[in-house]
């Protein structure tokens, strides 16, 4: 019921442009594409009873705070929308999946009466292609990035074979606040970046003190599915699996301490989906 109420509220907010005039903390769930029929082996190694495939919807979040705006994650690259068939089989070391982007973030923002110049801060949970795809459209925003992540992306000496550096290239000269741990974005504790390394060197989660739903932690890719959380299993392709387990323990402690709900961004059963993904 709470879930339905949230969607309803989101729809009402959608109807009242311009969206940036927030008088309280509000969040829009945005459609950042989907990766369906993904082979689960790399995500759930050594889990004998895992399903063979899983669907991974991809969400981004527009955070409207009285002091400013934050975009959390930047979705799949535009190229997944441009294809003539609107989807195609994507074949990589992660296996085969149907990867599709519905509407670009800039178009979803325009529907809210906003443009990239209205986004004060850009923060990516991490630099993989499904979270950094449209980051270049927000190169005018201030990038909130862990120093370890930024170094990993741009230092040619470091092994970052499983990211597409070109997607992040437009941010190389962007105004940035390099972080080394947690960060209170607007200074009142209601929007906090939580350092959670392991999936990538500077992976991070986002805490939101929402009145509507109660406090929430957005997972990034700390977990990809409910099963990853239940079994405390990091994917095989994480940069540091032990560090991931430490981050899981830390984020779970914060979730428990603050009475928060964890929304697993790729898990369709966890937290509200963007209306386009819920259909
Ligand atoms: Zn992801």
Image (cartoon, rainbow, N blue to C red):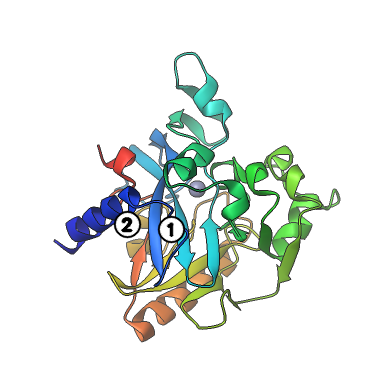
Q: Dot 2 surroundings within 10 Å: few (below 14), some, or many (20 or more)? A: some
Using the rendered image of the protein, determine whether residue 3 is visible from the camera's viewpoint. Answer: yes
Q: Determine whether, in the image, residue 215 is placed left or right of residue 76.
A: left
- Camera-side residue: 263 or 2? 2
Q: Determine whether, in the image, residue 254 is placed left or right of residue 128.
A: left
Q: Quadrant of residue 27?
A: bottom left
- In the rendered image of this protein, does residue 266 appear above or below residue 144? above
Q: Dividing the image into 4 quarters, which one contains the N terminus?
A: bottom left
Residue found farthest to the right: 157
Residue under numbered circle 2 = 226
- Camera-side residue: 147 or 61? 61
Q: Say whether marks 2 and 1 touch (CB < 8 Å).
A: yes
Residue 240, x across and y down, in percent: 62, 61
What residue appears at the point 64 percent right and 56 percent down from the top-left corner? 239
Residue found farthest to the top: 84
Q: Dividing the image into 4 quarters, which one contains the C terminus?
A: top left
Residue under numbered circle 1 = 223
- In the rendered image of this protein, does residue 205 appear above or below residue 228? below
Which numbered marker is on residue 207? none
- In the rendered image of this protein, does residue 101 appear above or below residue 218? above
Label 2, label 1: how many angstroms apart (C-alpha)?
Answer: 7 Å
């Amino acid at each position: 019921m709470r879930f339905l109420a949230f969607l309803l509220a989101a729809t009402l907010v959608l109807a009242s442009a311009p969206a940036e005039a927030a008088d309280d903390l509000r969040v829009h769930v945005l459609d950042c594409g989907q990766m369906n029929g993904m082979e689960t082996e790399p995500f759930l190694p050594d889990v004998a009873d895992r399903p063979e495939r899983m669907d991974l919807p991809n969400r981004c979040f527009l955070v409207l705070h009285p002091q400013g705006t934050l975009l959390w994650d930047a979705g799949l690259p535009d190229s997944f929308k441009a294809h003539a068939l609107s989807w195609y089989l994507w074949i990589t070391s992660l296996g085969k999946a149907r990867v599709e982007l519905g509407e670009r973030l800039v178009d979803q923002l325009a529907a809210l009466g906003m443009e990239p110049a209205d986004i004060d801060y850009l923060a990516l949970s991490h630099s993989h292609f499904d979270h950094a795809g449209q980051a270049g459209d927000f190169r005018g925003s201030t990038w909130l990035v862990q120093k370890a992540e930024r170094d990993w992306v741009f230092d040619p000496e470091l092994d970052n074979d499983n990211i597409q550096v070109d997607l992040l290239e437009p941010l190389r000269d962007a105004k940035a606040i390099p972080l080394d741990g947690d960060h209170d974005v607007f200074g009142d504790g209601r929007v906090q970046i939580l350092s959670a390394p392991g999936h990538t060197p500077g992976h991070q989660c986002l805490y939101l003190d929402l009145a509507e739903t109660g406090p929430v932690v957005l997972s990034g890719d700390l977990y990809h599915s409910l099963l990853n959380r239940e079994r405390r299993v990091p994917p095989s392709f994480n940069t540091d699996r032990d560090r991931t387990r430490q981050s899981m323990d830390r984020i779970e402690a914060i979730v428990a301490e603050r009475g928060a709900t964890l929304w697993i961004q790729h898990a369709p059963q966890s937290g509200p989906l963007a209306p386009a993904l819920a259909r």
